Image: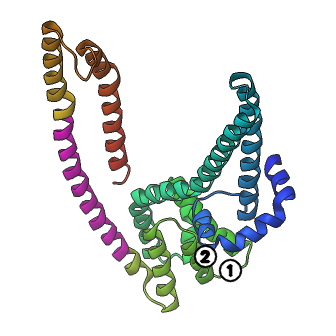
Amino acid sequence: MMLSGLAYRLFRGLARRLEGKFKGYRVVYERSGLTEPFPIYLSVIILYTLIAFIASLTGSTLLGVIIIKDIKLTLLYSLILSVFISLFICLIMLLYPIYRASSRKYVIDSELIYTVGEMAILAAAGIAPYRIIEEMVKVEENREIKLELKKILRNMRIAGDDISSALIKASEGSPSDKLRMLWDGMRNTLLMSGNLWEYLYHVYENLIADKIASVKQATSTLNVLSEAYAGIMILLPLTLVITLTMMSAIGGYVLGVNPLTLLVILLILILPAVGIIAYLLVDSILTRI
């Protein structure tokens, strides 16, 4: 927090100028759930990039003088390396809000169906929209959905917005397309004096249909992956082990490498790496259901 304040004091003017040129990125940043104001985050990016450049330039120059012992060549290599490292740090910090927004989207979409179902029950009981949001904040277990609900209450209690304006702001700041459609639909239903319970129940039915379709698609994808996994992790290793063992017994090399060396690489490096990749693929599919 202290570093954020220091960064904003040092680069406030530059951050304000960049803010106007990053309007699209600001929308993504607001949907990421990060609490720092956007200009402060830009200031932190500038400060970290500058620190990375100075630190890498100093360290690589000192190391280069010891190893290369050519000052001009050392400075050239150090400058190139420092620019690369600082740009890498800048890129990572720019991509982080995008990653956060994408991650929040999947977390929200995976459990939104339960939230809508509970909201429909409250609406059927005749509870006012503001009270529905207030009660959902108390009982909601999904952290990201709860954060979006709190934004609506905050805008109504602190900013003095009515329910319609609060839903507009919540829709603009939501990383989930489904949640944006929910807020927009609620707002339109309230403006037209429609039946909120019927609308929420309609959304609930659509979410159930989407959930069923996503489960079927995930099941089909997992079936394909399981067949590929069986071939890559069972049949292919057995074939290669037998082949390389026979080649080692007969004598010879594969691309200039001893077959036993290739066998060790296969068993110790390649197979575990393939297993980790398969696990990550399955996990990414299951988290989107």
Circle 2/circle 1 CB separation < 8 Å: yes
Mark 1 residue element: loop
Q: Position of residue 234 (x, y in %)?
A: 17, 27
Disc ID at residue 153 = none
Give the residue displayed 35% in from the left and 33% down from the top.
Answer: 276
Give the residue displayed 78% in from the left and 69% down from the top.
Answer: 16
Taking 285 as reference, is 57 above or below it?
A: above
* 206 in magenta: yes
Of 162 and 262, which appears nearest the observer?
Answer: 262
Give the residue displayed 18% in from the left and 13% down from the top.
Answer: 252
Residue position marked by numbered label 2 in the rendering: 169
Which amino acid lies under the numbered mark 2 shown in the image of this protein?
A: Lys
Which amino acid lies under the numbered mark 1 shown in the image of this protein?
A: Asp
Taking 183 as reference, is 109 above or below it?
A: above
* 60 in magenta: no
Tell me which colouring the rendered structure shows.
Answer: rainbow
Residue position marked by numbered label 1 in the rendering: 161
Q: Which residues are magenta?
A: 201-230
Give the residue displayed 20% in from the left and 33% down from the top.
Answer: 232
Of 51 and 155, which appears nearest the observer?
Answer: 51
Q: Position of residue 223 (x, y in %)?
A: 18, 45
Taking 231 as reference, is 94 above or below it?
A: below
Mark 2 or mark 1, earlier in chain: 1
